[in-house]
Image (spheres, grey):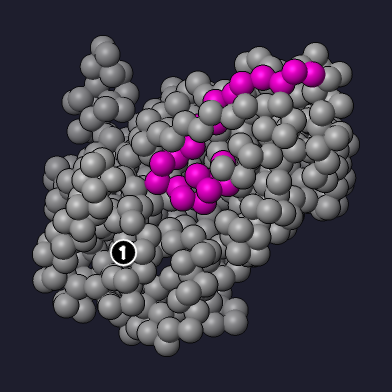
Amino acid sequence: MKKIFVNIFLVLSFFSFLGVTSAFSKDPKTLVVAVTGEIESLDVMQLAAPRAWSVAWAVYGNAMEWGKTEKNGLEYVSYDFRPGLIESWSHEMVGTSLVYTLNIRKGCKFKSGNELTSADFVYRTERMQALRPWNNTVWGLNTGHEGYEIIDDYTFKVNIDAPNPISHIGMSQMTMMIPDSGEMKANHTADDPWAEKFIRTKDLGIGAYRISRSVPGVETILEKNNDYCAPEYMQAKFDKILVKIIPDLAQQVQLLRSGDVDLAPELPAKELMDLLGDNDISVLSFDSTTFLALGLNNKMEPFNNKKVRQALAYATPSSDIIDAVYMGKGQIPSSLITRGTIGALEDIWPYNYDLEKAKSLLNEAGYGDGFDMDLVFNLSASTHADSAIFIKDSFSKIGVNVNLKPESPAAFQEKLRKKEQPTFMYEMLSWTNDAGYSYDMIYSPGGFANYPNYESSLVNETIKNAWVVMDDDERFPMYYEAQRALDDDVPTIIITQPHRMIALRSDLGGYAKYFDEMPRYHEMFRK
């Protein structure tokens, strides 16, 4: 009876989609995007899933816009930044500090009518310092908002007190997604001192689009911001964007084929392979530095035991998952600092599939009889769910009983952020292609993506010592010993580096490969 009800629900959802979107899908000025799960938040401090980021990019314009170059018919972004909400900037060394002077574009207004000023940039950094300080310190801004000097409403300086080799990239990151500080401060409360609950579903930025309708679990509709103050190259191309939640992958494929959907960025390889022969659909594919991993909470038993972690690494069936789940479209593990990362060693991953080795290590660790473990995964990530089944089957052969625990996207991301899960399926990508950034973000105690709760004195010391070396030829080899030690510690288990693949209608243009590999809906256009 339950199965019949679910099937009826899916059919009704399908026809509901057609009814809601018929006017949009026939309108060439509307972009229709299909995603598999909800938009859990629009707050830069809480964002995790790519689908949420893509919406956030549309409603929060960049202060400094990325440069673009073309290669083999695909646009790639570069660090040649262009003016955005920041109209111009300069920098100079003052003693040992790197000082930026930034000039804000005048007349940029939030939905509330408040004008963008220097105070909004200071607030963003102050909030980041309180909630996620790593996002300031990784670029060398150890003093946080105290390193800001407001000259006037439209001019401010940033004193980067500990500049490092990637500080020049950091200014674009520290000034992205600026919220309306007036609205935010009006909603600070004792229980929510930084308005995290308030901003979760609000578009409090200045971007190419504004949210006109949002129904949790159903859809989000964005409308063009006709008062957007940014340069022409940042303006919206579509009048509307409809982001529709369609959990059923077969429905996404059908709607993409029919033209009712323009873009399906979350389709896995199995579905994408079936679309390759369709002349009306383009399937873009490129190597990625993203890794899919089995995360282990290093502060929880038995995963605080290195031999247990190593045993599970030897028992992880990467090749089977690559072949069956990703249809061969994935790279074998190279290292915890992924293949393609600038400054990293490659192909040093020591864990080939070896069940006998895994059993021996479990016995040495005192778990010869195995143990039970909960494996949590995001319900909306089909490749994670499918991979978890392979892991469960393989681990059973070494006496480890895996209980699969699917969770909603919002619940999963919240627990991941708070490091409450014992083991979990997740993907990770360093937005800045630099080995030092990856170490600091994923494996340092303060790194916001250190979901495995890992800490190593060798890795910490290496990060600290290498950041002050400005010559990359000298800096990168400093990481090599730490990289080998990291793989030996195996705080998280790399399964694959899946190829990035994305399906869209052939008449759709404007897709660019960003370092974060997420689609920018607001840059796409109808050819």
User: Which part of the image, by quadrant, shows the C terminus?
Assistant: bottom left
Label 1: few (<14), some or many (≥20) within 10 Å? some
Task: Left or right? Give the position of 146 relative to 309.
Answer: left
Residue 387: where, in percent of width, then height? 58, 46
Q: Residue at x 16, y 66 (%)?
A: 18
Q: Which sits in the foreground, 147 or 65?
A: 65
Q: Residue at x 86, y 18 (%)?
A: 364
Residue span colored magenta: 368-388
Residue that sits furthest to the bottom in the current view: 279
Residue 443: where, in percent of width, then height? 67, 32
**Where does label 1 land, which residue?**
251
Q: Label 1 is placed on what type of residue?
A: Gln
Q: Residue at x 63, y 39 (%)?
A: 393
User: Which part of the image, by quadrant, shows the N terminus?
Assistant: top left
Q: Is residue 370 above or below residue 99?
A: above
Q: Which sits in the foreground, 447 or 4?
A: 4
Q: Residue at x 61, y 58 (%)?
A: 324
Residue 255 on the magenta segment = no
Q: Which sits in the foreground, 488 or 309?
A: 309
Task: Left or right? Give the position of 272 relative to 316.
Answer: left
Residue 407 in sight in this render: yes
Residue 182: where, in percent of width, then height? 22, 33
Q: Is residue 447 above or below residue 264?
A: above
Task: Left or right? Give the position of 461 relative to 258.
Answer: right
Q: Which sits in the foreground, 326 or 4?
A: 4
Image quadrant in which you'd find residue 319: bottom right
Residue 450 in sight in this render: no
Q: Is residue 242 above or below residue 439?
A: below
**Which element carries disc 1, helix, strand or loop?**
helix
